[in-house]
Image (tube, rainbow, N blue to C red):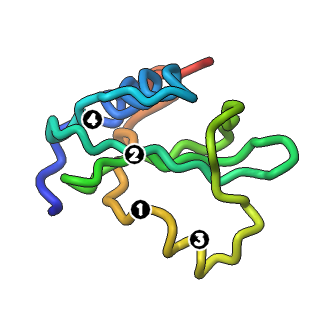
Amino acid sequence: MAGEQRASYADWQRAYGDYYEALPGRLDLACPNCGHHELRLVFVADEDDRIGYAQFSCGFCRFGIHVSRTWVPEGVEFEPISTPAPLLRERLPDFTLVHPPAAANDDDIEEVRF
């Protein structure tokens, strides 16, 4: 059920950081957009170095962010980057991407480091 986008890109980044820090455990975190507890984090990465990208989204309001160049922590499952595109599309959540502000420069976007 798609709703209205209320949370900013920075709100999503902060939630992602909290969620990521809890890995490989699971954090029961409310969605920054709708407040429901249906956040999911899916990684797609190289099987050798565990570097790839992540999709962090809410299964209820169907908003989220894409995080590129991230490392998948040990003990966390991921989709291999070699997965054929049609199969990968079936496995990844469908959501509306929240983008950084259009006028953002590097100083406007909160960087999440681990």
Q: Residue, x 55% and y 46% (percent of image)?
A: 54
Locate residue 112 relative to residue 79 in the image: left or right.
left
Which kind of residue does numbered mark 2 sit on?
Answer: Arg
Q: Are marks 2 and 4 in contact (CB under 8 Å)?
A: no
Residue 93 is tagged as 1
Residue 40 is tagged as 2
Quickly name the residue at label 3: 88
Which kind of residue does numbered mark 4 sit on?
Answer: Ser
Quickly name the residue at label 4: 8
Q: Residues within 10 Å of mark 2 (few under 14, many from 20)?
A: some
- Cα distance, mark 2 to mark 1? 9 Å
Which kind of residue does numbered mark 1 sit on?
Answer: Pro
Q: Residues within 10 Å of mark 1 (few under 14, many from 20)?
A: some
- Cα distance, mark 1 to mark 3? 10 Å
Q: Position of residue 81 (x, y in %)?
A: 73, 61
Query: Between disc 1 and disc 4, whose residue precedes?
Result: 4
Q: Are marks 2 and 1 in contact (CB under 8 Å)?
A: yes
Q: Residue, x 17% and y 61% (percent of image)?
A: 2
Query: Between disc 3 and disc 2, whose residue precedes?
Result: 2
Locate residue 29 relative to residue 13 in the image: left or right.
left
Query: Between disc 3 and disc 4, whose residue precedes?
Result: 4
Q: Nearer the viewer, mark 3 or mark 4?
A: 3
